[in-house]
Image (spheres, rainbow, N blue to C red):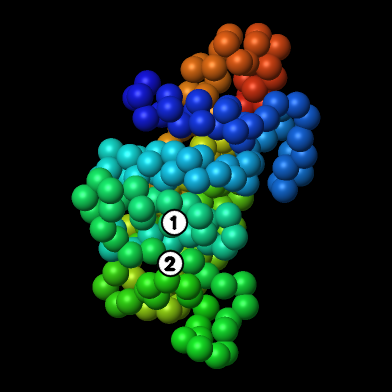
Amino acid sequence: MDSYKQRFIDLLVRHEVLRFGDFTLKSGRRSPYFINAGQLRTGAAIAGLGEAYAECLQREGLHCDLLFGPSYKGVPLAVATAIAQARAGSDVAFCFDRKEAKDHGEGGVFVGTAPWDGARVVIVDDVITSGKSIHEAAELLRKAAAVTVAGVVVAVDRMERGRGAVSTLAELQAELGAPVRAIVTIREIAAYLHPRVIDDARLRAIEGYLAEHGA
């Protein structure tokens, strides 16, 4: 496993972003683990997150002019990733959306650099569950300007089945016509943390969940 992935998983564990137990997801599925990026609440934590996203972008060859983070969880992701990109020598614009359009000042629905015709945009988000928020983000961007959605990067691929036989991530990639990548998959997390953090029982629970809901 690449060292940046190991550092990222360690970050998730250190800040209790990754939790184990019995959780009900938005989809209604009961999961033995849960990921809450809102636990990254300090400057060092969010900096580490941005570095992982920027490294993933570089490794996957996802070049862009604009980073977009859907409100609200995508806001710090876009900012932190843009900072990390700049430190690595690639200064790109970022923006995020308001939940309600502003009718005074500069107005509009975007904060930061608004999308422009011809821009290549990468959307950054935390975890794909249904893909709904990513679809909404892509639609919002394309309504605003003639942009190209160059890709999507999320923190963790839960490797769950979508509406059909393939994963939600694969479905989303086909529908957007753009690569959708994750920094790590749940199986990579499980393999790296077993048995140090994930014991045999938790590993069996994760594998059982994937056997039932995985692609």
Q: Quadrant of residue 198?
A: top right
Check residue 95 in the rendering and tell me which mark sits there, or answer none: 2
Residue type, numbered disc 2: Cys
Helix, strand or loop at mark 1:
helix
Image quarter of the C terminus: top right
Q: Report the front residue among 18 and 146.
A: 18
Q: Quadrant of residue 30?
A: top right
Residue at mark 1: 78
Image vertical order of residue 49 relative to residue 10, above or below: below
Residue in the picture at 57% in, 84% down: 102
Give the spatial CA distance, label 1 vs label 2: 7 Å
Circles 1 and 2, Cβ within 8 Å, touching? The answer is: yes
Helix, strand or loop at mark 2:
strand
On the picture, is 142 further left or further right than 93? right
Image vertical order of residue 95 relative to residue 83, above or below: below
**What is the residue that sits farthest to the front in this orientation?**
43
Is residue 83 something one can see in this rendering? yes
Residue type, numbered disc 1: Ala
Q: Report the front residue among 64 and 130.
A: 64
Residue 184 appears at what percent x and percent y? 46, 32
Image quarter of the N terminus: top left
Is residue 181 something one can see in this rendering? no
**What is the residue that sits farthest to the left in this orientation?**
89
Check residue 108 in the rendering and tell me which mark sits there, or answer none: none
On the picture, is 11 further left or further right than 36? left
Residue in the picture at 51% in, 40% down: 45
